[in-house]
């Protein structure tokens, strides 16, 4: 079994996590809505992740909704002292499974209480405020009002640390004037490279960058360069994509998600993959070919 200790660690506020974690989104049903097809399999994946050394789990109560957090509680509660559970608020699900903005003070407060209840916690380690202003990516707009609500919940002792998700550099700067930001969670991977400069700036500030869709999301990354490197190294394309992210910057924390035990083990094995310099150069070029889309 792979050890993820090789990936090193990074700080999330006063907590320290290993750089290779687990994203729980795909444990819910199709479209991240409703219960999983196989509840026992979902519980097994969560337990295997923690047994394998994962101590950073990413989730949200709007996955399901409620489903993913309830699975985490059922599988892992009472939680290990070193386990850091990071959640997101700022959205809700419509009855048809649609993704809707939920950023009023009442909605944000309810979301924190829903996360606490369904996870079985008294305080949330990290809460990411997700901006829903952009449909296909971040869009400018002030986060002062919703972020001030989360900061007040932090002062009340319900939230330990605060992060931002789906945001622009200007929104991060605004957020840091309001409250300490410990992490940023945006769309980024081997192909989707719009945040290259932002990642480096955050690294200087000691702020974690957590890419969502590190493997392309529900449309896996496709690249002949990636495939060629993977074949040469005797690895899967997904393992190479994760290894590239770990190499990209020391403040990157990975949360690849899966509902499959085999895929979980494959993802964690990326910790053992060393990328030769020439392979890294070839992979770096994928973003240039694809453009910072």
Image (cartoon, helix red, strand yellow):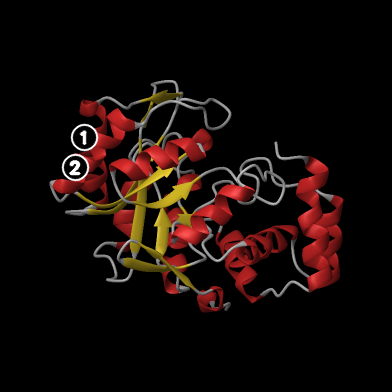
Residue 236, percent from left and from top: 74, 63
- The residue closer to the viewer here, 280 or 18, is 280
Task: Evaluate if marks 2 and 1 touch, with contact meaning CB atoms under 8 Å apart.
Answer: yes
Residue for point 45% across, 48% down: 184
Q: Tell me the quarter of the picture where residue 89 sits.
A: top left
Residue 243 is drawn in which quadrant?
A: bottom right
At which x and y percent is residue 264?
A: 56, 62
Q: Residue 14 carries which label?
A: none
Residue at image location 38% in from the left, 37% down from the top:
174
* Direction from residue 228 to residue 166 in the image, left or right: left
Q: Which of 269 and 161 is in front in this view?
A: 161
Q: Does residue 44 appear to the left or right of 108 in the view shown? A: right
Is residue 230 visible in the rendered image? The answer is no
Relative height, residue 107 to residue 215 (above, below): above
Kindly identify which residue carries mark 1: 109
Residue in the image at 51% along x and 26% along y: 134
Res. 112 visible in picture: yes
Reading the image, the residue beneath label 2 is 153
């Amino acid at each position: 079994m792979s050890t993820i200790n090789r990936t090193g660690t990074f700080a999330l506020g006063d907590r320290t996590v290993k750089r290779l974690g687990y994203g729980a989104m795909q444990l819910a049903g199709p479209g991240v809505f409703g219960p999983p097809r196989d509840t026992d399999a979902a519980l097994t994946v969560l337990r295997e992740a923690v047994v394998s050394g994962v101590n950073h789990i990413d989730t949200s109560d709007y996955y399901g909704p409620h489903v993913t957090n309830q699975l985490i509680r059922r599988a892992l509660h009472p939680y290990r002292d070193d386990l850091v559970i990071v959640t997101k608020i700022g959205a809700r699900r419509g009855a048809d499974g649609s993704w809707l903005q939920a950023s009023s003070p009442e909605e944000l407060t309810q979301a924190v209480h829903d996360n606490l209840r369904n996870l079985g916690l008294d305080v949330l380690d990290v809460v990411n405020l997700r901006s829903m202003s952009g449909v296909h990516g971040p869009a400018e707009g002030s986060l002062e009002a919703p972020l001030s609500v989360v900061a007040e919940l932090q002062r009340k002792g319900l939230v330990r640390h605060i992060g931002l998700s789906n945001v622009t550099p200007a929104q991060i700067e605004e957020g840091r004037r309001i409250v300490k930001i410990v992490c940023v969670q945006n769309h980024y991977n081997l192909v989707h490279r719009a945040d290259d400069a932002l990642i480096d700036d955050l690294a200087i500030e000691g702020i974690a960058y957590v890419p969502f869709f590190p493997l392309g999301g529900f449309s896996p990354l496709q690249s002949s360069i990636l495939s060629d490197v993977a074949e040469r190294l005797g690895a899967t394309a997904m393992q190479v994509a994760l290894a590239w992210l770990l190499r990209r910057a020391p403040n990157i924390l990975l949360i690849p998600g899966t509902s499959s035990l085999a895929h979980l083990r494959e993802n964690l094995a990326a910790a053992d993959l060393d990328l030769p310099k020439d392979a890294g150069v070839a992979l770096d070029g994928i973003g240039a070919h694809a453009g910072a889309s």
